[in-house]
Image (spheres, rainbow, N blue to C red):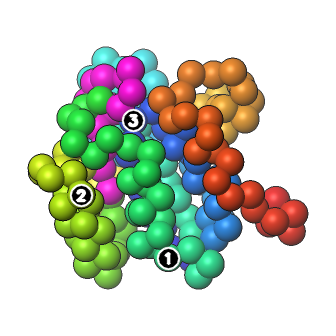
Amino acid sequence: MREIYLAGGCFWGLQKFFDQFSGVVCTEVGYANGPNRAPTYEEVCNDSGHAETVRVVYDDKMTLERLLDLYFTVIDPVSVNRQGHDSGIQYRTGIFYTDTDQLETVMRVCAREQEKAGMPLAVLVQPLENFFSAEEYHQKYLEKNPGGYCHIPDTFFHMEQKGKEEE
């Protein structure tokens, strides 16, 4: 099992998006790469410096390259501190890696995406400094609140359905 931490705007939709794919073992929403102390959601919304982030644990059915390609389908990679209608430092985009072996793949995918965009990406590429799990009511939020706001269009939540044996 491997893990990577992806920030892509509001973490509710990003978590629901990744949960649908075979090879994604589990996800968890939280706050990453801010000051080294656990913040509350209210502190994050008031510029604590943390990014809303999804911890993605994946197995050998999912490659890091495919995972990152999927990530780039649901973010605006050139938008600074903004995704959809959400704006602020907590909505910045970032790929926070946990193993330097991941860096070559991350850089290759980012270079390809920058070429597509025709301009520099606003996606931070950094080692994971810290991650604090978000409050329980944020975990699987859109499953608990199907009408909840999300900047990711609903069609992206139906790209692949995990087999019954994986649920």
Q: Nearer the viewer, residue 154 or 99?
A: 154
Q: Which residue is mark 1?
A: 63
Q: Amino acid at mark 2?
A: Lys
Q: Amino acid at mark 3?
A: Gly
Classify mark 2: helix, strand or loop: helix
Q: Amino acid at mark 1?
A: Thr
Q: Quadrant of the N terminus?
A: bottom right
- First in residue order: circle 1 vs circle 2: 1
- Camera-nearest label, 1 or 2: 2
Write down the quadrant of residue 153 in the picture. Answer: top right
Q: Which residue is mark 2?
A: 116
Q: For mark 1, does the 10 Å Cα neighbourhood hold few (<14), some (14 to 19), or many (20 or more) residues? A: some
Residue at (66, 39) in percent of width and height: 140
Q: Quadrant of the C terminus?
A: bottom right
* Residue 48 in view (yes/no): no
Give the number of the disc on residue 9.
Answer: 3
Q: How far across and how far down the image is residue 166, in percent?
A: 80, 66
Tell me, yes or no, whether the two marked residues, 3 and 2, touch with CB atoms within 8 Å: no
Direction from residue 14 to residue 86 in the image, left or right: left
Residue segment shown in magenta: 83-95
Classify mark 3: helix, strand or loop: loop
- In space, the residues marked 3 and 2 are separated at their CA atoms by 21 Å
- Camera-nearest label, 3 or 2: 2
